[in-house]
Amino acid sequence: MKIKSVIIFSILFVIIALTAFCIIHRNQKQNEIKQYFIGLNEAPVSIVVYCGFFDIYCEKTHSNYPQIRDNYIVAGKVKYSFIYIPKTWNDKEGEKDIKVAEALECAGMQWKYKEMYEKIIQRNATIEMDELKQIGIEIGVDQGKFNKCLTEGLAADSVLGKISRSHEMNITYFPITFLNKEKIEGFISYDSLSKKINSLLGDN
């Protein structure tokens, strides 16, 4: 009888331990928020833009990217990242924003962050949620994995985690641009941003 009780206790202990491990492991996975960069990791200047997609000031901010890419990123001088923060949660535009942000994360999981970001900002407000899978095909993702990620919301935790982290940093409106450690509030033109970049690079 004692042996039977010991066996039952041992089985229960193993079940509890495994359950606790799975919960901890799952929480660790949820807390692993990947930040994707366009450009070389060792680039001396980092640009991180906090913004939405379809707000007029965010569209103007995104419009700086092609010149940043052509003049600095391809030369290995700048690395660039975009962090989505929502303008609203309550309307269809907000729902589209969230789903587009998830598509960007899903593409990033397949090393296609740059390609997806460029497609999104090219189309701006004209993009529709039902186009996202087609864009995935255009940029060459594994379509099965991308569709599953998008349909099942596998990138939702990452998107919401970045939003939560942004709020912890008191970033509650946009656009906000971090140029290395300098915080730039509101829209900044490419010419003004370029001068700041050149200053950091020691260029005239």
Image (tube, rainbow, N blue to C red):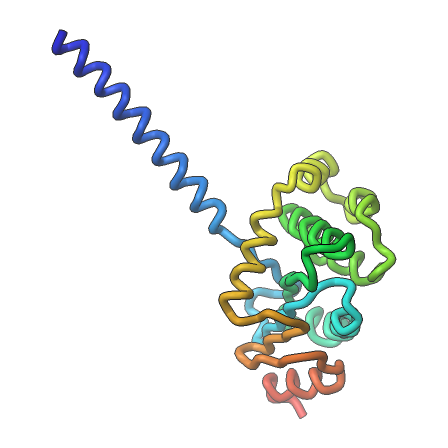
Above or below, comparing residue 123 to residue 144 in the picture: below
105 relative position to 70: left or right: left
> Residue 200 appears in which quarter of the rendering?
bottom right
Q: Residue furthest top?
A: 1
Q: Residue furthest front?
A: 90
Residue at 77%, 67% (x, y): give it. Answer: 55
Q: Residue furthest right?
A: 126
Rendered-image quadrant of the C terminus = bottom right
Above or below, comparing residue 44 to residue 164 in the picture: below
| Residue nearer the viewer, 104 or 19 | 19
188 relative position to 46: left or right: right
**How many numbered dots are placed on residues in this image?**
0
Residue at 21%, 14% (x, y): give it. Answer: 7
25 relative position to 167: left or right: left
9 relative position to 139: left or right: left
Relative image position of residue 68 (x, y in whole percent): 73, 74
Residue at 34%, 29% (x, y): give it. Answer: 18
| Residue nearer the viewer, 87 or 32 | 87
Residue at 26%, 25% (x, y): give it. Answer: 13
Rendered-image quadrant of the N terminus = top left
Relative image position of residue 198 (x, y in whole percent): 65, 86
> Residue 9 appears in which quarter of the rendering?
top left
Q: Residue furthest left?
A: 2
| Residue nearer the viewer, 52 or 83 | 52
Relative image position of residue 87 (x, y in whole percent): 69, 64
